[in-house]
Amino acid sequence: MLVAVWHLLLTQGAFAEAGRTAALLRVVSLNLCADELVLRLADPGQVASVTFLARDPRASNVADLARTVPMNRGLAEEIVPLKPDLVIVGAYTTRTTTAMLRRLGFEVLELDIPRTLGEAYAQIRMVAARLGVPERGEQTVREMEVGFARLPAVAENHPTAVVLRPNGFTVGRGSISDEVMQKAGLSNLAARLSTDRKGQLTLEEIVRANPDLLIINAEKDAPPSLADGLLRHPVLAAFATAGRSVALPPRLWTCAGPALTEAAARLATARLSLSGVGASGEDRPAAHLGGGTLR
């Protein structure tokens, strides 16, 4: 009798698992940030293709997970033969391919760029729910919330900081990077100097503002370029010499995912390493200007 019951339970479990496997969506990603979400959240074998960028460790936080997954370059002729149940795209990328896939009847889920951590959490939950694994979305959000909660305590007066990206671009107000800086206990000086989320600052503006911390937002081993060359302007060396500069890979806060907590942790560590720094840097002389601008 017990053997018969055990056999029945095994059979029911096998049918349940078969039903779940049959119900799995075959998903394709045409966006770097979507790559990260589907590779973190989806079941093994559920991801039919991700972008070629997902395998690049300089751009991707999930290069290891993407190693065995077929790649695409955002072309419709690559996606159609895969017959995916769902295609996840970015709101501002592969627009021609997205339109064609929709005309051909494929389901397309479009991801916008989150501007706050709340929007990032909502996006993670949405993708997880669409993949049929809402519990993984909730777990990911909880882990991120715990990561932020574990950051070092923040003093009342926050050291000032400016993010410097290739071609002089910075992080302004109303961006998720700005919120991550706040979580790390830094006051985003560019939010007062720049008029939009992705404005540019001149070299003179940065030196005149004299932030407590300069965040160089670029990959150290990136191929040489004129844009990145601006980040190595001699006048910025004064910040590094004084221990007031930190390098932060762009991949850590480009997308809405767990890497945001790592970005905050690195910035919090840099904040704690500042010595003799006032909240506004007023008790320090400004760095000497070597001439030129970042534009």
Image (cartoon, rainbow, N blue to C red):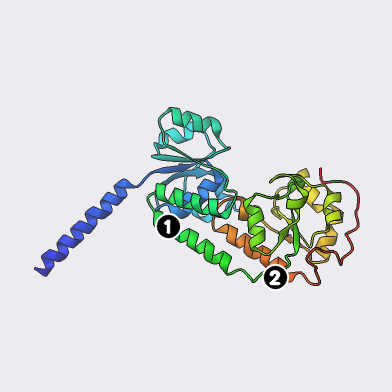
- Residue, disc 2: 155
Name the amino acid, label 2: Ala
Residue visible at 86% across and 54% down? 208
Left/right placement of residue 173 relative to residue 21 reads: right
Name the amino acid, label 1: Arg
Residue 77's label in the rendered image is: none
Foreground mark, 1 or 2, reads 2
In terms of image quadrants, where is residue 259? bottom right
In the rendered image, the quadrant that contains the C terminus is: top right
Q: Tag 1, which secondary structure?
A: helix
Q: Is residue 58 visible?
A: no
In the rendered image, the quadrant that contains the N terminus is: bottom left
Q: Mark 1 vs mark 2: which is more N-terminal?
A: 1
* Foreground pick, 216 / 122: 122
Establish if 251 lies above or below 105.
below
Say few, some or many: other residues with alpha carbon within 10 Å of mark 2 (under 14 / 14 to 19 / 20 or more).
few
Asked whether disc 1 touches disc 2, contact meaning CB atoms under 8 Å apart, the reply is: no
* Foreground pick, 178 / 166: 178
Rendering coords of residue 64 (x, y %): 52, 55
Left/right placement of residue 239 relative to residue 97 reads: right
Residue visible at 80% across and 68% down? 278
Residue 136's label in the rendered image is: 1
Left/right placement of residue 2 relative to residue 228 reads: left
